[in-house]
Image (tube, rainbow, N blue to C red):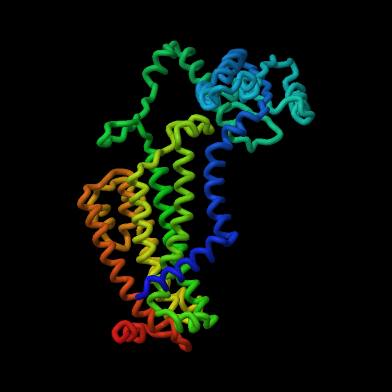
Amino acid sequence: MRAENVWVIATREYLARIRTKGFWIATIGLPVLMAAVLILPALLLTRTTSAHRLVIVDTTGELGEALIAELRDDSEFRKALDQLDETLDGVDTSALDDKLQGFVPLLEAPDADLERQRAELDQRIMTGEIDAWVWISEQGLAEDRIEYHAESVSNFVTQERLGRAASSVIRSFRLADAGLDVEQIERLQRSVSLTTLRVTEAGSREQSAATGVMLAYTLFFMLYISILVYGQQVMLGVIEEKSSRIVEVIVATTRPVELMMGKLAGICCVALTQLAIWLGTVALLTLPPVVARLGALPEGIDIPTLDPWLVVHFFAFFILGFILFSSFYGSVGAAFNNIQEAQQFAGIGAIFAVAPMLLFWMVLNDPDSSLSVVASLIPFFTPLLMLLRLAVKAPPWWQVALGYALTVSLALATIWLSARIYRVGILMYGKKPSLPEIWRWIRYS
């Protein structure tokens, strides 16, 4: 095999794909989406001017003022505002406090004519004077409900906040009415939070479970999609060249094996370029100065940091996984005459790619279980499942080394096997080959 021929073919494959609009749309689109998901919540929050104008009518005369106080002192909402102040360090957010109150509650005394008052409140909603009104009555409390009236009732987040505040006020009122110490009961019923710390050789550091899952999920599916998509690109490229008879001209100056290796190398470099841009964006977004100015994330979730060794394993397992699947797909493309015929046989490769997906949550939950260890050492599953184990908890070094050794061995065997099929199939036309015929190609080529 002549290295110069492989280099020329690989360069041509790389440049032909990297210059397409589709490549750059996909390459740039994902980082932009990632940045938007992290940054847009803060930008939208700082520019909102919405406040829910709410009229409260309490016919019991005992709960209205307490409900207003609860709405103005929503601890979870105040915590979100405090996080925003910390996130936007150096930016004056004092003007946002009134805008982001969530509710502008107003207590109105019940009229002698309740039906007329209810009709007037409806009219004030329709004219845009208020957004909603709440009716608290003895009968409603007996049935464990209060009324919420608004022109639109699809604002479930606002309703959830209001319901939470009303439940807290009514619960406290009922406890006090029963002669119980409300503060003591609330203190005794207070829930505890589970603080998770990841133990590493450098020591323990706090990390939420959601953070570990987010990192593992991102790397796993990034690797899964890249291996599958670029593996099939090899098959489609081979079929295109074979059906257009271009390959007959190419093999006049180069060997079929050189053509296959050049195609694999070129497309692999395209994938590595795209993955490098994606991971570079992740690394940039997880830098401390950037994290400090990102939008407020849900409670208990922080942005994970990429370990350099994990990045090395990511690229190494991608190369091995790409070789395994793309060499198979390349031989399939060479053996068949069109996409329809090839896709039926290519489903075999998809089975090996989808199987790790079925084991994802089991391995994630217990990366040291017998199932996780054995599955991650099956060469076809190793690139995805061993990376998943590395992302959540570093397995023993011998398991990682054995996984690499077995996968490299299978990759070399796959290349050898695929090269023999490719050598004969790339110039075969006519009827779809059967499995016995493909086996004869392997034996005699």
Please identify the quarter of the rendering in which residue 403 is found.
bottom left
The answer to whether 364 is drawn above or below residue 95 in the figure is below
Q: Nearer the viewer, residue 10 or 122?
A: 10
> Residue placed at 36% from the left, 34% from the top?
207
**Can you tell which quarter of the image residue 134 is in?**
top right
Left or right: residue 360 versus residue 52 is left
Q: Residue at x 44, y 14 (%)?
A: 182
Quadrant in which residue 118 is drawn: top right
Q: Is residue 154 above or below residue 314?
A: above
Q: Is residue 23 left or right of residue 59?
A: left
Image quadrant in which the C terminus is located: bottom left
- Please, which residue is most extreme toward the bottom here? 430
Q: Position of residue 68 (x, y in %)?
A: 60, 17
Image coordinates of residue 428 in percent, x first then y, are 44, 86
Determine whether, in the image, residue 128 is placed left or right of residue 45. Answer: right
Q: Identify the residue at image location x=29%, y=68%.
A: 412
